């Protein structure tokens, strides 16, 4: 991203000529200082508006953090449901206000714990879920009506959502009261994260099914969290890190619009997960980018989709996923980095924060590391006066100029991809994957040459050879314990009921009906994730991995 | 660098983890360093990696593992390589590998482990000097 900030044409009269331009660490050209000339078209009402007013540049709610602090969420979940249950209880006791569940890779890929392909990964990067019983155990003693839970799950999101609903039923909680988010964003899986199962078309239909289900049954649940974080970790620029999620979100909206729903019913169920931090972090640009993101989404909804509802035009975003900015060298330096990421996110009015942990470059975070990231959020919320005033940087010549710049650049990148045939096409043919790989490689080269500074890595290094690091480890018996439970359930459950429910699911898939009701029936009968996915694989087939680099 | 035919490297991503930015960056870097590089794509098994290595007459296999599954994956792969008679090709591992596991991997026969502190330049240099030794 080396585009120049659009400048006033009368630059000869401007004492700050082009020689004052310098390139930031992210390749944006900036001036020595900014003044009123840099915001010639600035109009308070149309550019900003008060907090809570269109175009929402200053925030989506009138009182922002005075009314309600951002949700503080740290990613947790490992090994078995019992381990996860105790960590959740620990985090709630520590004052965390939302839960975020990490699922192991087999669960994310629709493989049961006894699948040979899953043998190395059960319970490794998150909790293993095979049947409804696991979900029941994870939330044992945690009333679902009182919490908001976020699930990092994509290709099997419909199944995990069904299990959460079924768990609520078992707890006696009315599912319509459930709050939370499922990631449920498949397009970025093909680009960056890799947990896709089926080809794009049926995958997007399945996302449509979950959105439709949420509109009707659990309207307070965010049925998609379109993610920009993973693609940024994978080489996307800050601009692409918003442009691609926007194009993706629009693709999901269209899927449901085509089913006859109103934009104002669908859009509020979409939220975004955007990067604030990471490899290409620049403090003021990150704030401006997120402000621009709110304004542009508001305009897209109003102008392109003729939305009339404030709820639909308000862009809800959480920030997170910046592990790529963490270093193994001098790991305590990461605490400072995390604090700056969190500061940028809160100055930009993020709705929810999920920070990296200082040990993330070399391990699954320990309790101490997770707690420290939570404390950083609490210090910003309770010690330094952040919630007192909404959008404190609003009106800054620099931040407003950058906000305009990012809005324009994001819109231009969206147009560029649309001109190439749209986001889906560019993902299917690998255009975007190739471009991100190129960019990631260029950034890496700049680090290796020392052109881009990383403190403690290519500057201010110390000798750390003998340092011992505390590393969190998963109990090696996890898999066998999980398989024992799994086998017990297979004996206890009514297998005829399971089979009937799976046949019904298959029929619904062939008929292209909404699959949520039949997935729910299968889940209630204790069908496994692998059994459900197996049925769908027979109908949909599987997507194959890309080998471009 | 000698003038004989270029070094053939297989960059492989075993296991279920799909984060392959690192694998692709290293593949690019080694290609820029003059090597012939094949990338397997994600979700490979020990079998599929060994099969590709044999088919493509690979000199070096580079595994990218971030998910904490390096010990079991490497153990299986090293055994299969011996069985398929390509035990003489050397294996490198890169990724999030705790320091205490580095020696265990080397005992299994892994030639070198590149942790998050390593650079692509170091990896390329290492491969070149190891191949020249032969």
Image (cartoon, rainbow, N blue to C red):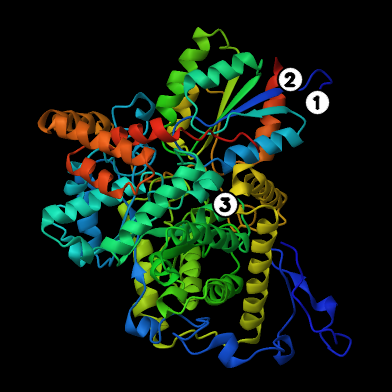
| Relative side of B75 to B37, left or right | left
Q: Disc 3 on helix, strand or loop?
A: loop
Q: Residue B1 carries which label?
A: 1
Residue that numbered label 3 is attached to: A462
Real-space Cα separation, disc 2 to disc 1, in angstroms = 8 Å
Alpha carbon separation for disc pair 1 and 3? 32 Å
Give the letter of the chain under mark 3: A
Q: Callout 2: helix, strand or loop?
A: helix
Q: Please give left or right for residue A209 compared with residue A7 in the image.
A: left
Residue under numbered circle 2: B132
Element at badge 1?
loop
Residue B52, horizontal then vertical, whole percent: 59, 19
Is A111 situated left or right of A412 in this image?
left
Label 2 packing within 10 angstroms: few (<14), some (14-19), many (20+): few
Q: Where is residue A424 in the image (x, y as percent from the top left)?
A: 58, 49
What's the residue at 17%, 48% (across, down)?
A136
Quarter residue A510 falls in: top left
Dot 1 alpha-carbon crowd within 10 angstroms: few under 14, some 14 to 19, many 20 or more:
few
Viewer-proximal residue among A290 and A375: A290
Q: Position of residue A199 (x, y in %)?
A: 50, 39
Subunit ID for the residue under disc 2? B
Contact between marks 2 and 1 (CB within 8 A): the answer is yes
Above-or-below relation of A279 to A495: below
Gap between marks 3 and 2, in whole Å?
Answer: 32 Å
Rendering quarter of residue B133: top right
The chain holding disc 1 is B
* Residue lying at 58% horizontally and 43% vertically, measured from the top left: B21
Relative to the observer, which residue lies in front, A217 or A238?
A: A217
Q: Are marks 2 and 1 on the same chain?
A: yes
The vertical placement of A388 against A500, above or below, is below
Asked whether residue A302 is in view, the answer is: yes
């Amino acid at each position: 991203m080396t585009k120049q900030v659009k400048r006033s044409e009368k630059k000869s009269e401007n004492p700050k000529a082009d020689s004052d331009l310098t390139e930031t660490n992210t390749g944006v050209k900036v001036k020595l200082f900014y003044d009123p000339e840099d915001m010639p078209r600035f109009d308070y009402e149309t550019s900003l508006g008060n907090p809570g007013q269109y175009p929402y540049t200053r925030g989506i709610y009138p009182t922002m953090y005075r009314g309600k602090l951002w949700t503080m969420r740290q990613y947790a979940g490992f090994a078995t449901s019992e381990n996860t249950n105790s960590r959740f209880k620990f985090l709630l006791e520590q004052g965390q206000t939302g839960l975020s569940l990490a699922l192991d890779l087999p669960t994310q890929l629709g493989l049961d714990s006894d699948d040979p392909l899953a043998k190395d990964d059960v319970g490794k990067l998150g909790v293993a879920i095979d049947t409804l019983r696991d979900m029941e155990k994870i939330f044992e003693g945690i009333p679902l009506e009182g919490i908001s839970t976020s699930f990092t799950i994509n290709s099997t999101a419909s199944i995990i959502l069904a299990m959460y609903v079924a768990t609520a039923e078992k707890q006696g909680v009315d599912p319509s009261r459930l709050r939370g988010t499922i990631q449920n964003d498949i397009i970025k899986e093909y680009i960056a994260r890799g947990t896709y199962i089926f080809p794009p078309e049926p995958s997007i239909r399945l996302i449509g099914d979950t959105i439709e289900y949420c509109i009707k049954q659990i309207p307070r649940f965010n049925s998609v969290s379109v993610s920009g974080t993973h693609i940024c970790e994978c080489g996307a620029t800050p601009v692409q890190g918003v442009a691609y999620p926007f194009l993706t979100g629009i693709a999901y909206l269209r899927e449901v619009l085509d089913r006859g729903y109103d934009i104002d019913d669908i859009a509020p169920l979409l939220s975004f997960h955007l990067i604030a931090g990471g490899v290409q972090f620049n403090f003021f640009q990150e704030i401006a980018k997120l402000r621009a993101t709110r304004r542009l989404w508001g305009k897209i909804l109003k102008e392109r989709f003729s939305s009339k509802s404030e709820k639909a035009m308000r862009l809800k975003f959480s920030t997170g996923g910046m592990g790529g900015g963490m270093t193994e060298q001098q790991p305590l330096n990461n605490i400072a980095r995390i604090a700056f990421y969190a500061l940028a996110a809160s100055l930009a009015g993020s709705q929810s924060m999920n920070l990296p942990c200082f040990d993330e470059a070399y391990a699954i975070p320990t309790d101490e590391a997770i707690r420290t990231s939570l404390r950083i959020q609490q210090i910003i919320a309770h010690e330094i006066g952040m919630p007192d005033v909404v959008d404190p940087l609003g009106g800054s010549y620099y931040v407003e100029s950058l906000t305009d710049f990012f809005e324009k650049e994001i819109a231009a990148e969206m147009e560029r991809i649309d001109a190439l045939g749209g986001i889906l096409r560019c993902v299917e043919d690998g255009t975007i994957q190739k471009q991100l790989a190129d960019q990631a490689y260029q950034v890496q080269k700049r680090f290796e040459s020392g052109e881009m500074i990383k403190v403690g890595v290519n500057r201010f290094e110390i000798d750390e050879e003998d340092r011992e690091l505390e590393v969190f480890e998963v109990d090696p018996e996890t898999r066998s314990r999980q398989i024992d439970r799994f086998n017990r359930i297979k004996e206890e459950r009514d297998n005829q009921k399971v089979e009937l429910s799976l046949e019904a699911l298959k029929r619904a898939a062939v008929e292209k009906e909404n699959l949520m009701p039949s997935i729910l029936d299968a889940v209630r009968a204790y069908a496994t994730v692998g059994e459900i996915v197996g049925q769908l694989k027979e109908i949909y087939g599987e997507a194959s991995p890309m080998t471009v680099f | 660098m000698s003038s004989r035919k270029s070094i053939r490297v297989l960059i492989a991503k075993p296991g279920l983890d799909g984060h392959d930015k690192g694998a692709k960056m290293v593949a690019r870097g080694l290609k820029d360093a003059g090597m012939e590089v094949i990338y397997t794509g994600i979700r490979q098994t020990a079998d599929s990696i060994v099969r590709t290595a044999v088919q493509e007459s690979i000199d070096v296999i580079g595994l990218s593992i971030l998910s904490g599954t390096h010990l079991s994956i490497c153990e299986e792969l090293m055994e299969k390589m011996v069985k398929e008679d390509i035990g003489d090709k050397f294996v490198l591992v890169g990724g999030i590998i705790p320091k205490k596991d580095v020696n265990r991997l080397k005992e299994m026969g892994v030639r070198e482990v590149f942790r998050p502190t390593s650079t692509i330049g170091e990896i390329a240099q290492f491969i070149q000097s190891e191949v020249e030794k032969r």
